[in-house]
Amino acid sequence: MSIDAARLADIHARAITPAWTEAALRDLLAQPGVWAEVEPDGFILMRRAGDEAEVLTLAVLPEARRRGRGLALMQAALATCRTRGVSDVFLEVAADNTAARALYQGLGMIESGRRRGYYARSEGPAVDALILTRNLGGTLP
């Protein structure tokens, strides 16, 4: 299946600041082990290396949020991880992103580290990135 990097860039630009460009997304998708789960109003980009996978980005259009889209994309990505032999999934999330943190906590992800001052903010000080992990040994919530 061919993935439309321009469409992903449009979604990303409307959902996340700073946004990734079409070229950056196309380059990522061309890398070994990278795949996307895509819906009309959002996508998740994943990268597998050995038995681990990283959530590179999860973007849902603002008008589609709080309707379970992020959860559905995460569940699809975790299911794909299992079929690809992934045992552990990790991601980074801004410490001040309470909605995303609640989503990931509901999926059983736990804090395993912190990168101090990782996310620059145009207003105010940089924000820590929390490193969250999930072992896929159990059942998906």
Image (cartoon, grey):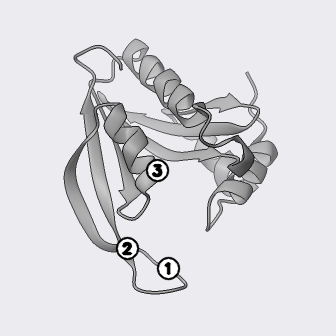
- The amino acid type, in three-letter code, at marker 3 is Ala
At a point 70% along the width and 30% down the height, the residue shown is 39
In this figure, which residue is indicated by the disc labeled 1?
121
The answer to the question of whether label 1 and label 2 lie on touching residues, with beta carbons closer than 8 A, is yes
- State which quadrant residue 22 falls in: bottom right
Of 67 and 141, the residue lying toward us: 67
In this figure, which residue is indicated by the disc labeled 2?
127
At a point 79% along the width and 38% down the height, the residue shown is 4
Q: Quadrant of the N terminus?
A: top right
Q: Count neighbours of disc 1 (C-alpha within 10 A) and say few if under 14, some if 14 to 19, many if 20 or more.
A: few
- The amino acid type, in three-letter code, at marker 2 is Val
- State which quadrant residue 83 falls in: top left
Q: Quadrant of the C terminus?
A: top left
The x and y percentages for residue 12 are: 68, 53
Position of residue 104 in the picture relative to residue 31 (left or right)? left
- The amino acid type, in three-letter code, at marker 1 is Arg
Closer to the N terminus: mark 3 or mark 2? Answer: 3
In this figure, which residue is indicated by the disc labeled 3?
99
Position of residue 54 in the picture relative to residue 36 (left or right)? left
